[in-house]
Image (tube, grey):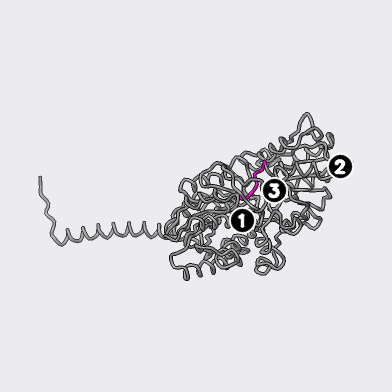
């Protein structure tokens, strides 16, 4: 074999070329990778995710998820900065998580989620430097899970990553009753964070470690509705349920089942042979189904139609009912709290059909005034009144949908848990905050804007006040009276 010997200067050139080529290859890879990540980044803690490239994740108010949220996020950012500057490291963080980049596939509206953030900020303000001031100071983080909460995992991972650095102890809000939001709750629970749902009502979301909700369950709403219907002085001897059968709609499934169980007695019956008529909103034919259902209602003529579906479907159902083929005019429609997620414009369109509509809300500003303070805390009620903080800060936004009140109470619950857990000795954990939820009873009931709250062992409130509301022609909600699952709401602490 002939041995080839390369001159030293040639060897050096070859080695240098190989090193340069390798460096360029790796440099190109990292440059492309960095550019791709930079393109996905919306802000610190917020990235583009999913097929629609939504900006999802967590912010302290520095990043505005939607233009209409600019004012309230600016207030949250200013308060967060003040706490960080004045409290040093002696604070905790509480996140408010829901879908903030909405599409037509979401049951919430821009208006409803904006009201939620306004209520969350009010709770932060009252706790830090208002009439409900307590330690430790609270920073409020804003977490967006994307349309239909499809990007919940990214946002949950971001929250978990902030547990130590931001002293995150609780996540509130949590969105409507959907399978995606339930999955997010279970993952947050696994990481031992305290969890407080603001508008989640499905019965099967319960008995989850560290989780409570300030809303009544669907069963409680349905029982409160039935209790009102039987004592309202208006005869509703027969009823039928119209229910969304779409898979994953936990709200509709539990609401319909609960009403069917609560309504019948010696003087009130469900129509036979089919007490429940269903449509499937996951199919493109759902609107045609509702039209066919109205034809069947003409044949059976129930006095009361209990609509177990989302508010966005209610408007189409009322249109179909108004265009019914029969001249029977004895229909009254009653439904659940998702109606409050509709905009005033949609509610006004629904009211224009002329069908009487009642619904169980989650809260209403008139609960305090018309019930003479028996079911709502006076200090909390003032904040939502004509001269209260919300009226001053956000004068053009309505408050009769109750969304701000529920978000306020969810954040207030987490703040109260943090205050009870805080002994002034240092860092407190989410698990410690969650344990304090069970101490909110008897002489230490949570004095909420939506009622006095005591949590049961499964995380749901006991005897929660449920306002019965009537849809006005102008699209606003008229308070009728307070009901409850057993007819008597939770009284104040004695």
Most extreme residue toward the front, as rendered? 494
Q: How far apart, in angstroms, are the residues tagged by discs 2 and 3?
A: 31 Å
Q: Earlier in the sequence, mark 2 or mark 3?
A: 2
Q: Tell whether 388 sits left or right of 181.
A: right
Q: What residue did someone put label 1 on?
A: 409
305 over 352 or under it: above or below: above
The residue sitting at 63% across, 45% down in the picture is 462
Q: What residue did someone put label 3 on?
A: 489
Q: Main secondary structure of the magenta part?
A: loop
* Residues packed near mark 3 inside 10 Å, few (<14), some (14 to 19) or many (20 plus): many
Residue 171 visible in the displayed image: yes
The residue sitting at 69% across, 50% down in the picture is 465
93 over 153 or under it: above or below: below
Taking the magenta stretch, the answer to whether it contains residue 217 is yes
Q: Which segment is the magenta one?
A: 214-219
Look at discs 2 and 3 and give the one toward the viewer: 3
Image mark for residue 330 = 2
Look at discs 2 and 1 and give the one toward the viewer: 1
Q: Earlier in the sequence, mark 1 or mark 3?
A: 1
Figure quadrant of residue 379: bottom right
């Amino acid at each position: 074999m002939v041995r080839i010997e390369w001159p030293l200067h040639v060897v050096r050139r070859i080695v240098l070329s190989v090193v340069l080529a390798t460096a360029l290859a790796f440099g190109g890879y990292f440059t492309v990778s960095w550019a791709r990540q930079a393109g996905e980044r919306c802000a610190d803690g917020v990235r583009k995710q999913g097929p629609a490239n939504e900006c999802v994740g967590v912010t302290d108010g520095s990043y505005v998820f939607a233009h209409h949220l600019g004012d309230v996020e600016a207030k949250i950012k200013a308060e967060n900065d003040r706490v960080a500057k004045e409290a040093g490291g002696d604070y905790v963080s509480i996140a408010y998580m829901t879908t903030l980049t909405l599409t037509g596939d979401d049951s919430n509206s821009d208006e409803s989620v904006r009201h939620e953030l306004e209520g969350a900020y009010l709770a932060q303000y009252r706790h830090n430097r208002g009439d409900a001031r307590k330690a430790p100071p609270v920073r409020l983080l804003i977490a967006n899970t994307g349309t239909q909460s499809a990007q919940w995992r990214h946002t949950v991972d971001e929250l978990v990553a902030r547990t130590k650095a931001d002293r995150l102890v609780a996540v509130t809000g949590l969105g409507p009753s959907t399978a995606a939001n339930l999955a997010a709750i279970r993952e947050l629970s696994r990481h031992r964070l305290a969890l407080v749902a603001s508008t989640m009502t499905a019965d099967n979301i319960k008995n989850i470690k560290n989780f409570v909700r300030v809303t009544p369950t669907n069963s409680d709403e349905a029982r409160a509705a039935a209790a009102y219907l039987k004592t309202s002085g208006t005869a509703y001897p027969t009823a039928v349920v119209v229910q969304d059968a779409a898979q994953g709609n936990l709200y509709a499934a539990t609401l319909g089942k609960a009403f069917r169980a609560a309504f019948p007695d010696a003087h009130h019956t469900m129509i036979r042979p089919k007490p429940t008529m269903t449509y499937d909103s996951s199919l493109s034919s759902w609107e045609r189904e509702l039209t066919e259902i109205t034809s069947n209602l003409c044949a059976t003529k129930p006095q009361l139609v209990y609509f177990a579906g989302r508010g966005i479907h209610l408007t189409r159902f009322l249109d179909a009912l108004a265009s019914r083929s029969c001249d029977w005019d004895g229909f009254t429609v009653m439904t659940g709290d998702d109606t409050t997620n509709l905009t005033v414009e949609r509610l006004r369109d629904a009211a224009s059909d002329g069908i009487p509509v009642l619904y169980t809300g989650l809260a209403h500003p008139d609960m305090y005034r018309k019930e003479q303070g028996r079911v709502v805390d006076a200090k909390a009620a003032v904040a939502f009144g004509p001269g209260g903080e919300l009226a001053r800060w956000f004068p053009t936004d309505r408050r009769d949908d109750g969304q701000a009140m529920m978000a306020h109470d969810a954040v207030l619950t987490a703040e109260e848990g943090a205050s009870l857990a805080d002994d002034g000795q240092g860092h407190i954990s989410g698990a410690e905050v969650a344990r304090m939820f069970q101490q909110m009873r008897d002489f230490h009931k949570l004095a909420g804007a939506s009622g006095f709250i005591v949590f049961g062992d499964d995380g749901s409130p006991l005897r929660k006040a449920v306002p019965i509301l009537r849809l006005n022609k102008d699209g606003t909600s008229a308070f009728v009276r307070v009901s409850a699952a057993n007819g008597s709401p939770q009284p104040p602490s004695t």
